[in-house]
Image: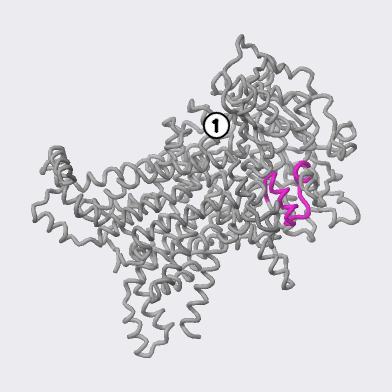
Amino acid sequence: MASRLVDGLEVVRAALWPKPLAWATGYALLLPALLVVGLLALGLVYIVDASFRELDTRTFLLAETYSLGNFQEIWERTVFWRITGRTLLAAVIVTAITLALAFPYAYLMVRTRSSLLRKLLLISLFLPFFIGQVVRAYGWLIILGQQGIANTLLQQIGLGPFRLIFTYETVIFGLVQYMLPFAVLMLAPALAAISEEVELAAESLGARWWEAMLNVVVPMAKPGFVAAGVVVFTISLTDFAMPAVLGGGTNDFLANSIYHAFFRISDPGLASALAVILVAIGSTIVAILFAWLGTGTLGFRKSSGASA
Amino acid sequence: MTKGVVLWTIVGANLILLAAPTVIVLAASFTSGNIIQFPPDGFSLRWYARLLELTDFRDAFWRSLQVALICTALSLPVGTLAAIGLARYRVRFATAIQVYLLLPFTVPLVVSGLGLMFLFGAWGILDQLWPVGIATCIINLPFMIWAVAASVNALDPDLEHAAANCGAAPLPAFLTVTLPAVMPGIITGGLIMFVLAFNEFIVSLILTDARTVTLPVLVYNSIRSVVTPDLAAVSVVYIVVATTAILLLDRLVGLDTFLKSR
Amino acid sequence: MRSRSTPPLWRRRQLLQTAGATALGAATLGLPRLGFANEPAKPAELIVRAWGGVWVDALNEGVSAPFSEMTGIRIRHDLTEDNEIQPRIWAAVAQGRKPPIHINWDTSTNATKSAMRGVTVDLSDLPNLEGLLPAATPVGLDGFPIVNVYSYVYVLAYREAVFPDGPPDSWNILLDPRFRSRVAVYNDGIGFHPAAQIAGGGTFEDIPDNMEPAWEFIRQLKAQNPLLGEDPDFTNWFQQGEIDVACTIISNAREARANGIDVAWTIPKEGAKIDTDALWIPQGLDDNETYWAKQYINYALTLEAQQPWLDRLGLPGVRPGVVPPADLVGDPAYPTTDEDFARLISVPTPILAEYERDWFIKFTEIMQS
């Protein structure tokens, strides 16, 4: 029954997609995805267009004519430099800390012989990943507030209370926690590809365990590090929720500036110009990293740079 | 220090870091007091009872569910076909196509949100819910393609050749050999897409209004009002959905697949 | 300024009993017909943009809940921030889509901008405009594209325990090193710019042309590492012990006090900014929705709505006969006499409509540097 249905479908397919069209099959399969992502590309066209139009503050409409006014304004206003610097610094710090924390986690998860422990580590990873950023930020607000559990515990041993939320450090802390699952999940497959015997061989040649780790495992896991690093860096660089919830209003990132330019001072032109700059910074850095280190495991195809 | 001690110290810190917000939110939701404090005032289910009365949150929950379903329904065919097309067929400009398909990840979410707001606004569909579902599909599509591509890449091409050599026509070969073989990737991708759409925040914040507001946006707005335990009870909805998704993932494909080298 | 947030669920004690509400019409209610021969169909719900915390509670208790009970129309409160709803409404009207809300509860400044842009519905046929105090009339606009609904003062709120010798008498207290990291103002500085101008040694007459004294004061405030927030944040931060002093609207401080926190407020010697909030209806709604939105605003102008609404907020209304809550009788932060008003700084709304955006930008620039 089922096979007759399949045969019937095959007849329809053969009629609609005859053999001479076979060369195009790959493109046909890709077409829906190209169209869906095309919507985003179209949206970007609107943004680029708006970025070259200045706001007329008498009518609060964008100008009909193109100009570089928005970019000039951003260039001249030091605050945007500060915010860009703050965002980049945070993204670098978050990437470094996250990779440092994620590596041992991924390593233990891949190497452990206990399937129960492996499952536990995986669940601990997926649970926050699947819960989402907003609920987690809310959790940190409860934990780190002036009367939260952290300060309560500190006071019991005679310290504090400290201002633990609404600082730059808290935003970075929240981002590290947010990014950890991404980093571990991108690192783990690369580590799984490294045979344990390689490490044992290094150690049998007299290397200490941490030397074997740094000189053997880490270099071999490079594609995983590149992929994890790029993902963590770009997501941190463009984050909105953590600075908004944990930043206390004075630790905005570029994404917050874009949102505020659009929704708080109603300037779509300035917001779009900032958006173009953020995209430019992000893609330039990613392009440099890719050119320097390869695409790591980020590609969809086995052949194109995917490791191991 | 031994390797084990160092590893376990770092992993232990990681585990606390990962679990803390979830555990605290869960604990806070059972308080009997009016404000969240530690130690809690006592145990009660009153905030859960309150949940049932909150029509705004209930409506937002259903809207989030719809968004997640639309997103998943769209991503499954689109992502699966694209992954097979990329991994199995010779296409020209493959690298350029890959970079293009990674666009949703290289474009910051806030920028994607604004761009889609411009676009949907110009098309006059900004005040509806289904475009939010499409938006969540767009911004997370690479996850779907990755998941399926991993399965396709793991699939032995000889199997498909064998099917072809045995006289199987292209479509039956696809349906009976390729599709079942990549099913784990499709299930994984589908679940991830569903959960991420259910959680999606910043793009939804930009695209929704009071008539279409989804649950994460409503939770975010509440955080900016007064922090109270009923919000913790709402958040537990997320913990339940996440747990269900993880159990499904483990049962259907096994969490271990994420550790396989690609 | 001010909050984008959801209705404080835990406080919605009275769920609107729309199901049981009698479907009374405007006529039976004593609501006027507003020029329709037959009463237009009732929408299932009206969406009113509001501020979070005590603000939405007060609106619900004083206006929305009774209005629902009378008409059977459910009122939903959208707590999108006032600045953030503005571009959404403007875009919707420009693109011919239905605006996201039916009634905007807005600062008079933002409301004036929307009126100047022509996206508001004329309210001059509301019967209850009759007999309102002069503060209700919009400044710098023709007729009633918006209607002001009460006045309020941006006071200096403080924790009593840290001022055992009596209230601080100057905004300079915000710069006291004792309160480093323990001061708060609005996230765009709204309500604070004129006070900072005077406290920074400038003059009222120099607003808006020379605001440098204000910016200098705000630069010093930045060094204090202040928290920047929206209405409910001030209530929260006082309640959770995060701050000791703040420039905020009296209602937020008074709400913390009502919740048992020792917060008080004062008008410093430099004065404090007084302003008004307004209600208005965006264009592009269906006729029947516009009709019932007008009925809502009309009801909000009655004494029976203003009294409970503004009791909870602690603000003077625009309907003669609204009496101050007992705790605010004689309080200069609830201005009633000429002497009270003389201590306050009133910047004309047209000036604010033209310049406030620039002040927000300047403030943000200092604070984010």
Residue C15: which quarter of the image? Answer: top right
Question: Which chain is home to disc 1?
Answer: C
Quadrant of the rendering where the N terminus of chain C is positioned: top right
Please tell me whether residue C45 is drawn above or below residue C251 in the rendered image.
above
- Quarter of the image with the C terminus of chain C in it: bottom right
Residue for point 51% across, 52% down: B238
Mark 1 — residue? Answer: C100
Q: Residue C341: horizontal and vertical position, in percent?
A: 85, 34
Q: Is residue B197 left or right of residue C278?
A: left
Please tell me whether residue C99 is drawn above or below residue C163 in the rendered image.
Answer: above
Find residue A164 and report its horizontal and vertical position in percent: 66, 62
Q: Going 41% across and 79% down the picture, which residue do you hit?
A: A214
Q: How is the image coloured?
A: one colour
Q: Residue furthest top?
A: C37
- Give the left or right position of residue B189, taking residue A177 as reference: left
Residue A267 lies in quadrant: top right
Q: On the rendered structure, is C40 left or right of B195?
A: right
| In this picture, residue B174 sits left or right of residue C26 | left
Instruction: Answer yes or no: is residue C205 visible.
Output: no
The range drawn in magenta is: C228-253
Q: Is residue B168 visible?
A: yes
The residue closer to the viewer here, C299 or C73, is C73
Residue B168 position in % (x across, y down): 11, 51
Q: Amino acid at mark 1?
A: Pro
Check the image and report above or below for C123 versus A102: above
